[in-house]
Amino acid sequence: MKKPEEILEYLNQKFGEDQLTLERGDIGEPWILVPASMIRDLSKFLRDDSELRFDMLMCLSGLHYLKEEELGVVYHLHSTKLDHYVTLKVRVPVEEPEVPSVESIWKTADWHEREAWDMVGVVFDKHPNLKRILLPDDWIGHPLRKDYVQQEFYQGIPTGE
Amino acid sequence: MGMLDKKYHDSNIIIVGLESALNWARKNSLWYEQFGLACCAIEMMATAASRYDFDRFGIIPRSSPRQADVMIVAGTVTMKMASRIERLYEQMSEPRYVISMGSCSNCGGPYWEHGYHVLKGVDKVIPVDVYVPGCPPRPEALLEGFLKLQEKITGETIIFKKNEADKKPETA
């Protein structure tokens, strides 16, 4: 069982010192900020390494940082074998919101990534079936973006008052 | 009834105006289209169950819109569902009635301002006869809605063809 700080130290030995950073909010657990290009290799290592064994992706969510003009993805991982937790975050610019898909590593990510695409518009590279999961296919925009403006009509039906 | 009973006792004849006979038959066999959209459907089911017992008013669920007289829109109408509701309504045979049950289907309910996915009132796609307020309405309120609908049907005529869109809605 490892703490996030120990996990970061362990990962640094494998991936080099300056790639990953541990960040901390006012409350809650710290998280590891991961460059988008690394996320798939890192995820595979986290799952398969005998000292980490993160076999479960508890949650994957999309975020929109309005001021920074960035989109984010948060991965909550848990090891059912070793009973430890870690949180990963990835941040990408709004203009090119491409994040490698981890669907091939944890199957849970399939629908979760589709939801993140549907709601905030994160594009998951190499996802096998990246289409909207909740909204209809012909919907315009991503509703959980903070600058979202709703279309006035959907299929001729008014969406407002 | 005393006189009629004596006079027509053996021949089984009832004398009544055609219009009131039709209205009487219609209002006492309001078969409703059976589908629920959200939590209001739970109250609708409770109304149909033994304690409140829809059946004593002749109100029974039908699984096909082609057999139904009245549609209870019980719950949140999402934009995805709106066009389907329209189609279900079009499949019902006339005379057909609509009861809008609960705040969501009346006006969007708690989603009226920020709910991008919710239709702000089912009356944007189909004409509504009775609005039942509540979130969700209790079974008594839904029953009251049906009694209002019965009142409305009692006043109908067969000569005066009413435009469905002009029908004045009632509030239970």
Image: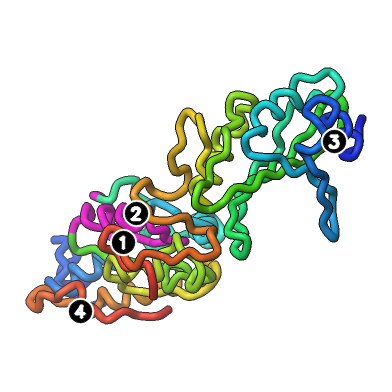
Within 10 angstroms of label 2, few (less than 14), some, or many (20 or more) residues? many
Amino acid type at image mark 1 = Val
Circles 3, 1 touching at the beta carbon (< 8 Å): no
Question: Please, which chain is the residue tagged with disc 3 on?
Answer: A
- Depth check, mark 3 against mark 1: the one in front is 3
What residue is rendered at 57% in x and 51% in y? Answer: A93
Q: Amino acid at mark 3?
A: Leu
* Quadrant in which the C terminus of chain A is drawn: bottom left
User: Which quarter of the figure has residue A54?
Assistant: top right
Q: Is residue B137 visible?
A: no
Checking the image for residue A92, the label placed there is: none
Camera-nearest residue between A117 and A65: A65
Residue B131, image x, y percentages: 40, 74
Q: Is residue A46 left or right of residue B165?
A: right
Q: Amino acid at mark 2?
A: Glu
The residue singled out by tag 3 in the image is A8
Label 2, secondary structure: give it: strand
